[in-house]
Image (cartoon, rainbow, N blue to C red):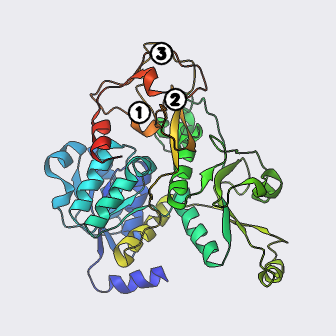
């Protein structure tokens, strides 16, 4: 029905005007998808690489004759997209501090924001939602990443009367010790930045996405990093997990190497005597635990549904709530000697991120470990053994713009 609504909306000749920040692999896809979606048009693209921004504009222009404003990050800093006439900002960079400032500026200017950026979503989502409420707009996670797809699935099974027990990700491959250098070939095949590809492979991105689910629902990881058993098919969850031992609010987890690859799943509980015969007739099993899964998530293809939900209905796909129950902490990929500089946090060669219960301790959230270009990187001042959590007392952390913003946001 959304397609029909947008087609009707397109006939008003007042399309939803979209500004895009980040023109990498996903950004290029978003540019094209917005261009072919009825009732939407891309009006601006910003990227640190102005050639990438121009490429995204050309992609969008292939399906639209709209004039598109193109800028680099530097130009954005000087002039700002917030002065342009647009309705929804899509943030699709892999930055954190820069992205948070961009999104905050958009929200304060009365623009809706869609986050195709799980890192800024985790680090600043609660603050951005507060700004959205203050300015009568919406900030939402994207609809096409696993966490967005899962939230829609969870909403649906609760509508049907099931109690969510597990929200799950089907992870294809996991190597916590991967590096951007070791993945350069695979990244090129997939048209991905090697650092970004590394964050996918070492499980950091997985943990961030599942932490977003946790902080939106109250579900928790059962153990640090989640259990993540290997499986042949998603249906194996019934003998791989002991659902009886989990808290009533449910858990977030994943299975490794299972079919259908690229999918997500949810497990719901129902023991209602009236409902159970129906569920058996529908071939969902004998219960009381029932499996629901989707064999795909389509990233940029689904971004327009998040844009439309925000603009047409004022609704979020997913938003971080407070108090947060989960965090993604930094763990050493290898022995870290004194003097080691952590030049790249997410997807780098020094750390991987693992979800755990949020705690008031000395561990370093991986989203706060990043230093912007031109800033001094964190430096190890006490040896950290491989597979041990990194603590603030283990590093000399410069006063980065990211940390300043995080404190100013009251987080």
Give the residue drawn at x 23%, y 55%: 105
Give the residue drawn at x 78%, y 74%: 271
- Asked if residue 262 is positioned above or below residue 276 in the image, the reply reads above
Looking at the rendered structure, the secondary structure element under dot 1 is loop
Residue 8 sits in which quadrant?
bottom left
Q: Residues within 10 Å of mark 3 (few under 14, many from 20)?
A: some
For marks 2 and 3 on the same chain, the one whose residue lies earlier in the sequence: 2
The answer to whether mark 1 and mark 2 are in CB contact below 8 A is: yes
Residue indicated by mark 1: 369
Residue indicated by mark 2: 351
Q: Nearer the viewer, mark 3 or mark 1?
A: 3
Q: Residues within 10 Å of mark 2 (few under 14, many from 20)?
A: many
Image position, residue 116 (x, y; %): 42, 55
Q: CA distance from mark 1 to mark 2?
A: 10 Å
For the residue pair 228 and 91, the one nearer the viewer reads as 228
- What number of labels is visible? 3
Circle on res. 333: none
Q: Is residue 195 left or right of residue 258?
A: left
Q: Residues within 10 Å of mark 1 (few under 14, many from 20)?
A: many
Circle on res. 382: 3
Image position, residue 302 (x, y; %): 49, 66
Q: CA distance from mark 2 to mark 3?
A: 15 Å
């Amino acid at each position: 029905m959304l397609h029909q609504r947008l087609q009707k909306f397109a006939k008003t000749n007042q399309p939803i005007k979209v500004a895009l920040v980040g023109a990498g692999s996903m950004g290029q896809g978003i540019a094209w998808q917005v261009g072919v979606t009825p009732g939407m048009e891309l009006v601006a693209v910003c990227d640190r690489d102005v050639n990438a921004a121009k490429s995204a504009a050309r992609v969008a222009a292939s399906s639209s004759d709209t004039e598109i404003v193109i800028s680099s990050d530097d130009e954005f800093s000087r002039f700002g997209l917030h002065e342009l006439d647009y309705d929804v900002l899509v943030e699709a960079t892999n930055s954190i501090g820069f992205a948070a400032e961009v999104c905050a500026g958009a929200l304060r200017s009365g623009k809706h924001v869609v986050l195709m950026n799980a890192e800024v979503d985790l680090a600043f989502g609660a603050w951005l939602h507060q700004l959205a409420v203050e300015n009568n707009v919406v900030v939402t996670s994207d609809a096409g990443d696993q966490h967005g797809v899962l939230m829609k699935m969870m909403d649906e099974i609760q509508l049907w009367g099931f109690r969510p027990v597990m929200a799950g990700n089907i992870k294809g491959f996991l190597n916590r010790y991967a590096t951007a250098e070791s993945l350069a070939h695979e990244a090129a095949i997939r048209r991905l930045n090697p650092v970004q590809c590394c964050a996918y492979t070492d499980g950091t991105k997985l943990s961030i996405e599942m932490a977003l689910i946790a902080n939106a629902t109250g579900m928790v990881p059962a153990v640090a990093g989640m259990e993540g058993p290997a499986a042949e098919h998603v249906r194996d969850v019934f003998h791989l997990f002991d659902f009886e031992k989990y808290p009533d609010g449910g858990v977030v987890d994943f299975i490794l190497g299972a079919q259908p690859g690229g999918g997500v799943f949810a497990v719901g509980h129902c023991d209602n005597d009236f409902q159970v015969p129906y569920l058996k007739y529908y071939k969902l099993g004998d219960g009381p635990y029932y499996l629901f899964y989707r064999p795909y998530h389509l990233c940029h293809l689904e971004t327009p549904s998040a844009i439309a939900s925000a603009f047409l209905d004022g609704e979020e796909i997913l938003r971080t709530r407070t108090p947060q129950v989960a965090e993604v902490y930094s763990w050493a990929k290898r022995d870290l000697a004194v003097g080691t500089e952590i030049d790249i946090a997410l997807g780098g060669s020094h750390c991987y991120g693992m979800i755990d219960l949020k705690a008031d301790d000395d561990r370093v959230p991986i989203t706060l470990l990043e230093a912007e270009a031109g800033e001094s990187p964190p430096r190890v001042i006490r040896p950290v053994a491989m597979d041990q959590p990194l603590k603030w007392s283990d590093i000399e952390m410069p006063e980065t713009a990211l940390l300043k913003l995080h404190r100013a946001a009251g987080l």
